[in-house]
Image: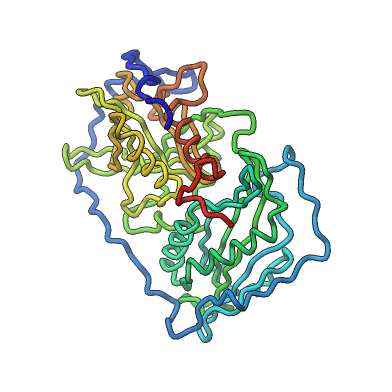
């Protein structure tokens, strides 16, 4: 157990609002006291579930029927220092077909190859597609490990059910993924920070221009060896708080990992980049039921969940806070891991750990009063990503990092805890699955 984080966190009251020349200079009080028209708060949506497309009378995944066809032209693994995320792939792929008449057909591991799709295939027209992102790691003894693959399979099942694609047996799919990882283990670097990125993907494959549940589907998995997200050490990012576009909305599909959620976010990201920001901070305007005033609620950052460390203005107690799973937030595996570890290891040190709605007003006030200690994103690719500042309504909001630091102590501790489990350094942890 690491030493208490409380000793690492300053109780400064220095103001942390800075302004840059390319932003309008708006007084802080004006920023906080903007009057907005009253409207009814958005009701909390009921989770919408599509009926399970996998008829229990149809064939389930049968791992005993797996066939493996090895490549006759094996690749030489790319040197570690030349790896680019998602550009290099392993020799093989795993695939399973499903039909409404027969259920899941025999799984296959074959040489990596192109897919053959009719121009009328429904995924190309109506976005019947859902995917996952997970990793395989190699520990110091050369054993291959997966990190919480059951969470990924459960989320993929929720995602595909939402768009009327067939669900599947998660544990059996994990068995197939393990077999795939054994075959491709030479592509997994035995160096901490490196891993094999696994991309399960399901698409609707029925040849039709009619709009309806697909009568056939393909579940496949490809893999790409990847290096550290920050190869030369942490680099804190700046976010543009985005109000002119929304990532998700109540009753929508923001909680599902669908490709259709990602493409619409690219243009706002490009616009943010032109203004000097690395990512969008996605906001959702809604009425605060306590005040009856419209507020910009914090949701996610880029393709990551977002956490903030804020000291209570009355008690000084540090709080780790993230937005709740209200149907607009992706249920991140790393997000859940951070919350679980924080409740186990930070709460005994005096922290509060909460999933609750919080606003940019709260973030701005905490920053101006020196109570905003850290902000970071979380996700499979980077584990954690520290945030230095947020551009919001013409102001640059400092997120508590000293100018000579790229990462805060809480962010760094979370990375160390999670990577220690991923690489098997924390012996016997239930989240690390040996292959």
Q: Is residue 175 above or below residue 364?
A: below
In the image: residue 131, left or right of residue 308: right
Q: Is residue 17 above or below residue 190?
A: above
Q: Name the image quarter holding the N terminus.
A: top left
Closest to the observer, 137 or 204: 137
Q: Is residue 145 above or below residue 52?
A: above
Residue 230 spot, x, y in % from top left: 60, 34
- The answer to whether residue 124 shows anywhere in this view is no
Q: Is residue 259 above or below residue 209?
A: above
Closest to the observer, 358 or 65: 65
Closest to the observer, 310 or 275: 310
Residue in the picture at 59% in, 78% down = 207
Residue 276 spot, x, y in % from top left: 54, 29
Residue in the picture at 37% in, 74% down = 51
Which image quarter: residue 39? top left
Residue located farthest toward the right when viewing the structure as drawn: 73
Residue in the picture at 66% in, 48% down = 142
- The answer to whether residue 60 shows anywhere in this view is yes
Closest to the observer, 357 or 57: 57
Residue 29 spot, x, y in % from top left: 27, 21
Which image quarter: residue 356? top left
In the image: residue 128, left or right of residue 366: right
Residue 413 spot, x, y in % from top left: 45, 31
Q: Name the image quarter holding the C terminus.
A: bottom right
């Amino acid at each position: 157990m690491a030493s208490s984080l409380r000793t690492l966190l300053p109780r400064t009251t220095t103001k942390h609002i800075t302004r840059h020349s390319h932003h309008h200079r708006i007084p802080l009080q004006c920023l906080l006291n903007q009057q907005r028209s009253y409207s009814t708060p958005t009701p909390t949506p009921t989770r919408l579930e599509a009926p399970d497309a996998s008829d229990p009378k149809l064939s389930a995944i049968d791992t005993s029927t797996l066939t493996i066809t090895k490549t006759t032209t094996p690749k030489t693994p790319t040197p570690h220092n030349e790896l680019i995320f998602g550009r290099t792939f392993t020799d093989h792929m795993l695939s399973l077909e499903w039909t409404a008449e027969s259920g899941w057909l025999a799984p296959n591991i074959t040489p990596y190859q192109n897919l053959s799709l009719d121009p009328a295939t429904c995924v190309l027209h109506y976005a019947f597609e859902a995917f996952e992102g997970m990793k395989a790691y190699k520990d110091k003894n050369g054993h291959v490990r997966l990190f919480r693959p059951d969470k990924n399979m459960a989320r993929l099942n929720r995602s595909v059910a939402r768009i009327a694609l067939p669900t599947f047996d998660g544990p059996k799919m994990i068995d197939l993924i393990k077999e795939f990882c054994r075959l491709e283990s030479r592509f997994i670097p035995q160096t901490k920070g490196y891993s094999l990125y696994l991309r399960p993907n399901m698409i609707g494959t029925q040849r039709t221009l009619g709009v309806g549940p697909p009568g056939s589907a393909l579940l496949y998995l490809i893999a790409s060896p990847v290096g550290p997200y920050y190869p030369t050490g942490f680099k804190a990012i700046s976010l543009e708080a985005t109000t002119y576009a929304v990532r998700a909305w109540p009753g929508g599909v923001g909680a599902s990992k669908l490709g259709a959620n990602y493409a619409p976010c690219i243009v706002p990201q490009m616009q943010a980049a032109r203004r000097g920001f690395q990512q969008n901070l996605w906001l959702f305007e809604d009425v605060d039921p306590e005040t009856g005033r419209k507020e910009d609620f914090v949701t996610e950052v880029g393709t990551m969940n977002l956490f903030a460390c804020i000291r209570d203005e009355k008690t000084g107690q540090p709080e780790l806070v993230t937005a709740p799973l209200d149907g607009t937030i992706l249920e991140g595996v790393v997000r859940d891991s951070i919350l679980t570890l924080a409740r186990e290891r930070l709460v005994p040190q005096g922290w509060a750990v909460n999933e609750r709605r919080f606003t940019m007003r709260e973030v701005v006030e905490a920053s101006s009063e020196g109570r905003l200690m850290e902000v970071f994103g979380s996700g499979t690719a980077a584990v954690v990503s520290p945030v230095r500042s947020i551009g919001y309504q013409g102001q640059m909001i400092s997120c508590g990092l000293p100018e000579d630091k790229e990462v805060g102590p809480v962010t760094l501790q979370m990375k160390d805890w999670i990577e220690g489990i991923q690489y098997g350094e924390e012996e016997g942890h239930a989240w690390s699955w040996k292959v």
